[in-house]
Amino acid sequence: MNLVTFGNIEAGVTLATDKHGYEHVLVVAKVTFTIKDDGTCAPSDEQQPLVYADEFYSEPGFSAVKYETDFALFKPKTDVLLNGSAYAPGSKPATRVTVSLQVGKMVKSFNVVGNRYWKRGLMSVSPTPPEPFTVMPITYENAFGGVDDTHKDPAKHRTYLLNHVGKGYYTNTDLALMDGKPLPNTEEINNPITKPDGKYKPMAFGVVGRAWQPRASYAGTYDQQWLDEHYPFLPPDFDNRYFQAAPEDQWCEHLRGGEAVRLVNLTPEGKMAFRLPVFEVPVKLIYRSHNEELRNILDTVIIEPDKRRCILTWRGSTRLKEKPNFLYEIWVGAPSKARLRALETGKRYIKWADLHELSEEI
């Protein structure tokens, strides 16, 4: 399969297998846009490349994923993700700031709090007063969760299943071991974190780990029956929601572009407003016997306000009904009229640059 892109688009193609064992042609297209001061977006001069393997904030397995691989087979919803920081209004140090992300009908808000620590008391621990801050990174490392490995017996070590890389979570009853340990910097509005063994929702805008709950529950059942009857394919109870990288409260019905975006306290200016770009990414599959238009869906939006950019990803797939070598070429983007005319008439398309090279060879 030969992949041809037209315009400032990053694109990739692969073969993927669904839970029924059917093979699909998967085409992914990504475009990076610059957010302009007037609230519009324009394709960036520098396009972000496709992500072929998860990229982490720091050490893999011990930090959150910043960019997940682009090659998921299908996302039932659009993931809205944001990589950024909280900013105190007017750059004046604050102990608590409420941040908000709105894309279309989806709205998510939570509190960002200055550094705090568990302080030992007579019968329990309690949070110290928050320290003032002007900028605070919003990541799952700064959200509630983590691993409690303070107990001498490894069998009693515990992991917060909703966020393996966070902080503030402890089940050990030894108060001395918790004394001075950091609390998270994010928490739900009207649900402050007061107990180290509480059941709090980790608050962030980024990628949820594949092994975290509730995402892991969508992966299906991998037991002896699966080994005997379905291996190496996905289990029958695999749910495509597993491919969703965003927190569930950041899933949207598939976006189309043009939706309003509003950010509060996620930029030094305090507020940012713009609209997602309306952008068409046509995909054509050219078989040896016929051509097909592939329907693709805008299913991932990454907003990075500190870099004044947003990254949009479209995905399309179709079940492979013929041998892969019968799929001659895949076009992503809008081809020229001359190229379309050559395809329609069954003629070879030759660019002027190709003619120049041929003349030099002659």
Image (cartoon, helix red, strand yellow):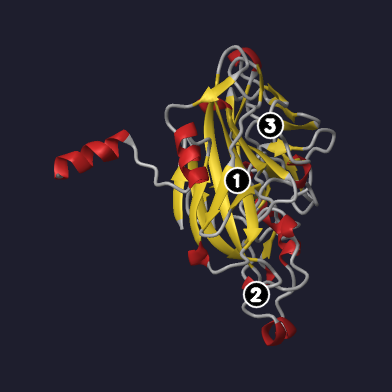
The residue carrying mark 2 is 233
The first of marks 1 and 3 along the sequence is 3
Q: Which residue is mark 1?
A: 141
Query: Where is residue 169 drawn, in percent x and y?
Result: 70, 52
Could you say where residue 22 lies in the image, as x and y percent from the top left?
Answer: 66, 70
Q: Secondary structure at mark 1?
A: helix
The structure residue drawn at horizontal position 21% and vertical position 40%, both measured from the top left corner, is 357
- Residue under pointer 3: 113
Image coordinates for residue 94, horizontal then vertical, percent: 66, 21
Q: Residue furthest front?
A: 345
Q: Nearer the viewer, mark 3 or mark 2?
A: 2
Q: CA distance from mark 3 to mark 2?
A: 45 Å
Residue 247 visible in the current orientation: yes
Identified by mark 1, the residue type is Glu
Amino acid on which the number 2 mark rests in the picture: Phe
Badge 2 marks a residue whose secondary structure is loop
Q: Nearer the viewer, residue 342 or 98?
A: 342
